[in-house]
Image: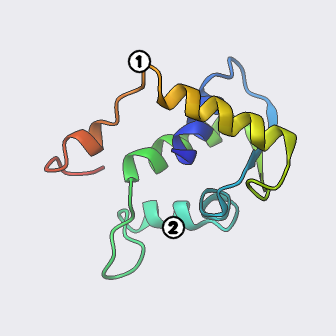
Amino acid sequence: METLAVIAGLEALTEPCSVTVYSDSRYVVDAIEKGWAVKWKANGWMRNKRERAVNPDLWDRLLTALDKHRVELKWVRGHAGNTGNTRADRLAVAAANGQNLPRDEAYENPGKEPL
């Protein structure tokens, strides 16, 4: 869910810009800031010789969105009283309980070959 939230935020931008994204997902922040996602893509969406990267469709969308902007990702501790993070959690829960959720094609069609 965190990966898709970053994607949605970046895809909502109408022109290239500089943006700082705050996330309580160390996985998302590290995958981008430490270059893991770029390496996974370069290696055919393999994390190593034995393990496939999870959600390659989302990582590919995120990398494409990142290419359009100058983005800095910063990790914030979740559930620690950070006003912005608390608000984001409330919005995420409300959205998840809503009717018009975006479809995750790769999840819904697990037999389909990933990117």
Residue shown at the point (39%, 64%) measured from the top left: 53
Is 21 on the left or on the right of 66, as rendered? right
- Of callouts 1 and 2, the N-terminal one: 2
62, 109: nearer the viewer: 109
**Residue that mark 1 sits on:** 99
102 vs 19, nearest the viewer: 102
Tag nearer the camera, 1 or 2: 1
Callout 1, which amino acid?
A: Gln
Of residues 72 and 23, the one drawn nearer to the viewer in this rendering:
23
Where's residue 20, x and y in %? 81, 42
Amino acid at circle 2: Lys
Secondary element under disc 2, as helix, strand or loop, is helix
Label placed on residue 39 = 2
Residue 9 location, quadrant? top right
Q: In this view, does 1 lie to the left or right of 35?
A: left
Which quarter of the figure has residue 67?
top right
